[in-house]
Amino acid sequence: MDKVMEIKEHLEKIEKLEQTLSVFEESDELYLDVLHKIQGEFDEISDLSLAACLELTDRIRKTGSSSIKKRIEKIPKMINEAVKEQIEELKDELKGDNTYEK
């Protein structure tokens, strides 16, 4: 997960920028510049988070699709087995009903 590492790096930058805020006064232009940089880092985190979420969504869809596909591929075999079992049961029942022939 490269995105997680990138997010951590941006969080570290934010932490460092927040520490520099104490050096400036709120009315100072540099204070506003640092706040703007912090906002930019949060924007980057937001973009990375969205991209990571989209990647995970794609992985989930692909995994779900392949799982469904595998299950669908098993349906004919399961139907054949079920039909064979029912035929065998019917045969066994018909063998047991030989009393009517006598």
Image: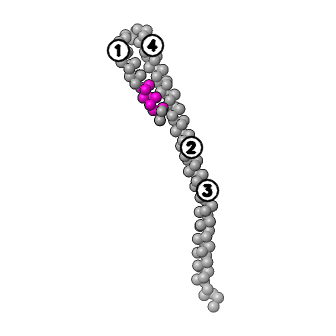
The label nearer to you, 3 versus 2, is: 3
Mark 3 in CB contact with mark 2 (< 8 angstroms): no
In the image, what residue type sits under mark 1?
Ser
Q: Earlier in the sequence, mark 3 or mark 1?
A: 1
Question: Dividing the picture into quarters, in which one does residue 58 lie?
Answer: top right
Identify residue for label 2.
61
In space, the residues marked 4 and 1 are separated at their CA atoms by: 13 Å
Residue at 37%, 10% (x, y): give it.
25
In the image, what residue type sits under mark 4?
Asp
Q: Residue 12 location in percent, x, y?
A: 40, 24
Q: Quadrant of the C terminus?
A: bottom right
In space, the residues marked 3 and 1 are separated at their CA atoms by: 64 Å
SS class, disc 4: helix
Identify residue for label 4.
33
Mark 3 in CB contact with mark 4 (< 8 angstroms): no
In space, the residues marked 2 and 4 are separated at their CA atoms by: 42 Å
Q: Nearer the viewer, residue 59 or 102?
A: 59
Identify residue for label 3.
73
Crowding near the residue tagged with mark 2, few <14, some 14–19, many ≥20 C-alpha atoms within 10 Å: few
Q: Earlier in the sequence, mark 1 or mark 2?
A: 1
Residue range of the region highlighted in magenta in the rendering? 3-11
